[in-house]
Amino acid sequence: MSKIGGAVCLLLVSVFISSVSQILLKKAADKTYKSAIREYLNPLVILAYMIFFISMILTMLSLRTVPLSMQPILESAGYIFVTVMGRFFLKEKVDKKKITGIILIFLGILIFSL
């Protein structure tokens, strides 16, 4: 695998990790807490922010090699990851509009990555 290919994969892993963190935050937001401080200082939220931090480090490492113009294109994969994980872990509905959006995002990534 070329150096840029590895960096692109690292950036996509970073986007995936960030998406996992978003799902964890959503799960934490769906719970009821006894106090406002517990909403922000509970294991799920702390873990999610730790994962966000790891994602940020991976993104910075990948941007050493990936052209900056490709970064927003690859970051849009996060919408796909969050939609798919939302369906499986949060039991959210995926309607025709979301499917159309996912297809358009995927096609955009494919076209701009060539």
Image: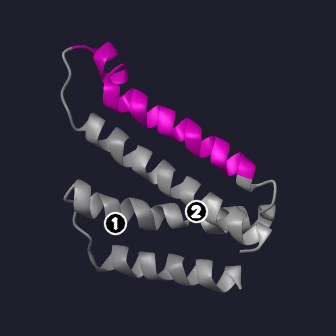
Q: Amino acid at mark 2?
A: Leu
- Position of residue 100 in the picture relative to residue 49 (left or right): left
Looking at the picture, does residue 97 appear above or below residue 75? below
Magenta-span inclusion, residue 89:
no
Q: Amino acid at mark 1?
A: Val
Q: Which residue is mark 2?
A: 12
Q: Would you say the magenta stretch is mainly helix, strand or loop?
A: helix
Q: For the residues carrying marks 2 and 1, which lies nearer the camera in this image?
A: 2
Please tell me the numbered disc located at residue 105: none
Q: Residues within 10 Å of mark 1 (few under 14, many from 20)?
A: some
Q: In x, y percent, where is residue 83?
A: 36, 64
Q: Which residue is mark 1?
A: 84
Identify the secondary structure beneath mark 2.
helix
The residue located at (26%, 74%) in the rendering is 95
Along the viewing direction, whichever of 29 and 50 lies nearer the viewer? 50
Residue 32 falls in image quadrant: top left
Residue 12 falls in image quadrant: bottom right
Which part of the image, by quadrant, shows the N terminus? Answer: bottom right
* Magenta residues (range): 35-61
Identify the secondary structure beneath mark 1.
helix
Q: Residues within 10 Å of mark 2 (few under 14, many from 20)?
A: many
- Position of residue 53 in the picture relative to residue 95 (left or right): right
